[in-house]
Amino acid sequence: MEHSLKNTELLDYYKARGWCGTVGFGDRPALLVVDLAVAWLKGEKVGSDLTAVVAQVRRLLAAARQASIPIFFSTMAYEPDLSDAGGVIDKKLRHLDVFIKDTPVVELLPELERRPGEIFFIKQRPSCFFGTNLLSQLIGKKVDTLIVTGCSTSGCIRATCESSIDNNFHTIVPMEAVGDRCPSAHEANLFDINARYADVLPTDDVISYLNGIASAKAATA
């Protein structure tokens, strides 16, 4: 049976057994852009074509900036000798030697046009929450809804969504704004993310939500 959100028979099967509930949007969202760095798109070793994903993330960034909500960007980076990788994960993920601190490949894509006040942080594990101050930043900004975008669906997106709901955030994944080098892994993990951790929604629906916030703020200004 095809493991995909497009498989309505499988989706109905899961729903009938208690998966695939809806968390919905809260009132105070933040946008998280996961690992849209040069290596993941243009690197010879791990890069893949995520052009369409970047275009959708740019749309979400425009809406998030208009709504004046917190925006976060992550990248993955290690010391040149991988001494801070831990000695185990670097055995499993042998491509980590690509992600060296202060090198061009770990920099954000220029087309994301990160602005002052938009937080950029380094992570060393798939989840954006593990070993970072993201949770305390979200709490400090009184965020209740985390919109998760970027790559890769089967790795860092899934892990971040699991951590997000573990910390009681309404977790939203705009389906066209996440991507993976493997189409089947992308489809299967979107299905599981929607079943277990987050609401996977059309990007247009998320933009409409953000536009509503912007309009409400403008009306009270």
Image (cartoon, helix red, strand yellow):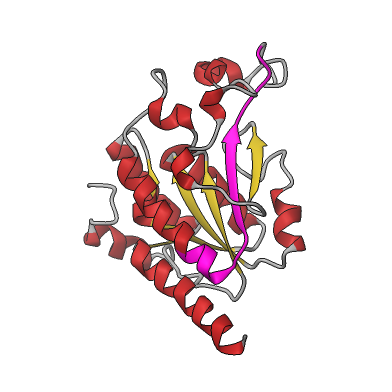
Q: Quadrant of the C terminus?
A: bottom right
Q: Nearer the viewer, residue 20 or 117?
A: 117
Determine the image quadrant of residue 207. Answer: bottom left
Above/below status of 174 relative to 104 = below
**Percent coordinates x, y for residue 44 in the rendering:** 38, 18
**Residue 196 in sight in this render:** yes
Which residue sits at x=51%, y=68%? 66
Which residue sits at x=61%, y=88%? 220
Q: Nearer the viewer, residue 219 or 70?
A: 219
Determine the image quadrant of residue 154. Answer: top left
**Residue 16 in sight in this render:** no
* Residue span colored magenta: 63-80
Determine the image quadrant of residue 107. Answer: top right
**Percent coordinates x, y for residue 75 in the rendering:** 58, 36
Which residue sits at x=52%, y=44%? 34
| Number of numbered discs on residues | 0
**Percent coordinates x, y for residue 97 in the rendering:** 56, 15
* Residue 71 drawn in magenta: yes
